[in-house]
Every structure is written in structure tokens, then in C-alpha cells.
Image: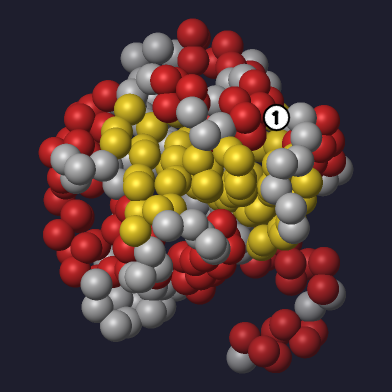
Amino acid sequence: MKQFLQDLAPPLLWRFLHELASRPKSRDWEYVPEGWRYADLHPSKVKGWNVESVLEVYKQKWPRFVAMIQGTTPIAFSHESALTGKTDLINHNTAMSFAYCAALAAQNVSTFSMLDWGGGIGHYYVLAQALLPHVEIEYHCKDMPLLTEYGAQLFPAQHFCADETCLDRTYDFVMASTSLHYSEDWSGLLAGLANATHGYLYITGLPTVSRVPSFVFVQRPYSYGYETEYLGWCLNLEEFLKCAEAIGLTLVREFVVGHRPLICSAPEQNEYRGFLFHSSSVVS
């Protein structure tokens, strides 16, 4: 019956009905025309990432996440997923894209140094160990104080930082996974990350648009158990790539993540993408 109705309905009408049915019941993602001023107008709600509820959810899921990473099943999950073992192509895409980028950056180095900007409590360190089993990894993670303090307890031999002093040195591989767009000064951060690599820079989980200028949205992740809200950029793809080129980055490979969350009232709907760059000092 569904196929019969689809054959009868005009394509535009069918697409509209499909998008209408898939819209979230609450405004989990919403365009905010006020931009970053929205946080000043709603300080009791927009508390960012440094909140206890985020850490508590991470801690609850950690044992299951580690066990699944160390198994033999497809890495088709993320630390924020339900961790049921159900195949999720977006998460599998994310993990395998990371594996490619990290393996490329780890060639011909005795100890692979990486900076994970916005790395939480060290999820990507566990993932890197599983995907690069014969590589010695020197892991550095930058995130909020609550998260890095706990991460340092999990991995006392690795390096966790709650400020930007991690940008004072260089690494073989620098990555920002689903984190660059949460910084108001994203272009300044991109320049700082670029200066911190003598190898490769991997920006992924980046919400992008192609027809309209960059805009700001609010994310309300209460369904994950996070009792907070935070703002983020949806970046114009051309603006982002021109900024990367201007600071001396050369695009090696672009990735389609596949995540397309509906942002209510947005001037254009987004697509999450990934980008592997190398600095001018790296010979391809």
C-alpha cells in the first residue's frame, strides 16, 4: 500500500509528507536568529558541556562502550548511541573514516602523537587503540574540566587538558570530531588547530550548508540525558574551505558522514561532513 501511494503521489508531495513525518516532536535542534547572543538571553538553559549530567551519562555507558570496541562486531555505534549492537551506518562511516585518517597520519612514526579536541573522557583513544593495534599512541585530549578530570583518572599515562595550552606544541595528527562548530570563534580555533599539527588535521562531524551563509542553532540534547543546551554553527561549506585554504591547509579528502538532523526553522537544512587536511609542511 505504501508503494502504491508513493507511485500515485507527485514526488514533491511525497518528499514533503516524508519530511513532515520525520520531524521531531520537540525542537531538539532549532535555528536561532539571535546568533550567539541567544546564550546571554537564556543563561539558565544554555549551560554548555561542562555539566555533571553529561559526565554521568558518559560514565554509565563507558563499560559497555569499551567492551563493544574490544569485540569483533562492526564499530557501528558511538559513545552517545544506545550501544545495543544494532548496525548504524552513520556511526560505522564515522569510525572507518577516522581509521583511514589516523592510519595515514601514523605512517613512518615510531610514536603516534594525536590531539583530540573536544575528546570527552577519551573515547577516541580507545577507538584508536582498537583500529591501530600495532601503533604506540601518545594521546592528548582537550575538553571541559569535568570531562578531562575523569579522563585523566581512566588513562593516567595519557594527557588531558582543560585549557588551550595543548596548542603550544605540535602533533602528528590533530582532530576535532563534532566539536569545531561549538566554538563561537571557529575560524580562530581552526587556525590554532592547524598550527598545532606538523602532519594532518581532521575536522569531522561538521554541519554544513551550501546555499546560505553560516548560521547558529541551539541543540537541546535532553533525550540523551544531558541536562543542558548548547549553541553551534552550521557553516557554509565554501566559507569553511576558503578559511582553511587561507591559513595554509590543503584538502586531502572530503568525507560524507551521513548525519542530517532537522534544524527547525533553518534557512537551509544541513549535512554533516568531514575534511582531512595537511599543512604546508607535509609532503603528500
Residue 260 in the image, given as x and y percentages of width and height: 61, 55
The residue at 67%/61% (across/down) is: 255
Residue 39 in the image, given as x and y percentages of width and height: 49, 15
Instruction: Identify whether 162 is placed above or below 114.
Output: above
Residue 92 in the image, given as x and y percentages of width and height: 47, 71
The N terminus appears in which quarter of the rendering? bottom right
What amino acid does circle 1 point to?
Phe
Give left or right: position of 135 versus 269: left
Q: Is residue 69 visible?
A: yes
Which of the 4 image quarters holds residue 232? top right
* Count of numbered tags: 1
The residue at 29%/58% (across/down) is: 126
Residue behind mark 1: 215
The residue at 36%/31% (across/down) is: 143
Give left or right: position of 144 versus 231: left
For the residue carrying disc 1, how many other residues have a C-alpha within 10 Å: few (<14), some (14-19), or many (20+)? Answer: many
**Of residues 4 and 280, which is closer to you in this image?**
280
